[in-house]
Amino acid sequence: MPRRLRALVVDDEPLARKSLAILLRADPQIEVAESGSGADAIVQIRADRPELLFLDVQMPELDGFDVLEMLGADLPPAIVFVTAYDQYALRAFEAGALDYLLKPFDDARFERALARARSRIETAGATPGDSRRLQRIAVKHRGGVLFLKPNEIDWIEAADYYACLHVGSKAHLLRRSMAELEKELDPAVFYRIHRSSIVNINRVKSMVLNPEGDYEVVMENETHLRLSRRHRQQLQDRIGLR
């Protein structure tokens, strides 16, 4: 027998939520749970680890984009946005990362979304590696959501209660703490050089002494970042500098 899939439907409108749940329960190989708010969805996803998420875009307090941004390494492998507004759907579909259902949708459109989700889940299940490491990072972008691969990030900067992800010439604010990111990023690639900075080791160009006699890390784009003394020797070992 094929493995049963765990699905979660998140929508603050009970009728819309129930309608999607009924469609999913028509398949005996899918276990369906429901959530009526973004905050509850985050708790439920982290507890139950569903593989498939149907997520409403517009919800009070935390919208669908907020939910993805805050999940971190707990992102389900297959996410389908559900929205009544096509501008959100098109933006959420950026980079081919997500599928979407535009309300009202028919059964055929639902089945196409479900088939695509199954394909993604099968692909994710065949991918080796630590599932607790961040495989992709969801950030709010132009009113939608953008998925970044961790190896695209040059360095990460603390910004109050946020983290600022520097990717080339662009910067993206993420509603996650530096401590959370440090635990979820691959330690073979990312290293914390200061309480306010995490660097992608592959983007480090050199280390230099500044006029005050302290070391700085120089990134490939010539950005200079402060290096804590207690991290200097380990960073030198990691990047092969002596």
Image: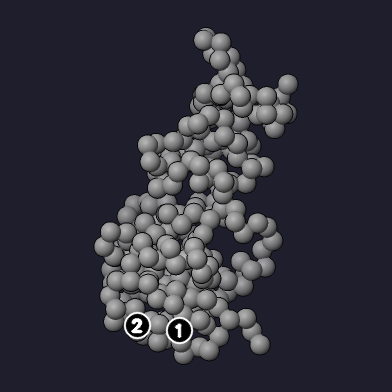
Task: Place residue 63 in its image quadrant.
Answer: bottom left
Per the image, the residue denoted by label 2 is: 18
Disc ID at residue 24:
1
Residue 10, located in which quarter of the rendered image?
A: bottom left
Q: Residue at x 46, y 57 (%)?
A: 71
The residue drawn where x is 42% and y is 59% is: 68
Q: Nearer the viewer, residue 173 or 193?
A: 193
- The quadrant holding residue 42 is bottom left
> Percent x, y for residue 201?
63, 35
**187 lies left or right of 181:** right
Quarter of the image with the N terminus is bottom right
State whether residue 99 is above or below residue 227: below
Q: Is residue 13 visible?
A: yes
Amino acid of disc 2: Lys
**Residue occupying the point 57% across, 30% down:** 193
Q: Residue 69: give x, y in percent of width and height.
A: 42, 54
Q: Is residue 206 visible?
A: no
Q: Mark 2 packing: few (<14 Cα in 10 Å), some, or many (20+)?
A: some
Say which quadrant the C terminus sits in. Answer: top right
Specify which label sits upstream in the sequence, 2 or 1: 2
Which numbered tag is attached to residue 49? none
Report the colour scheme.
Answer: one colour
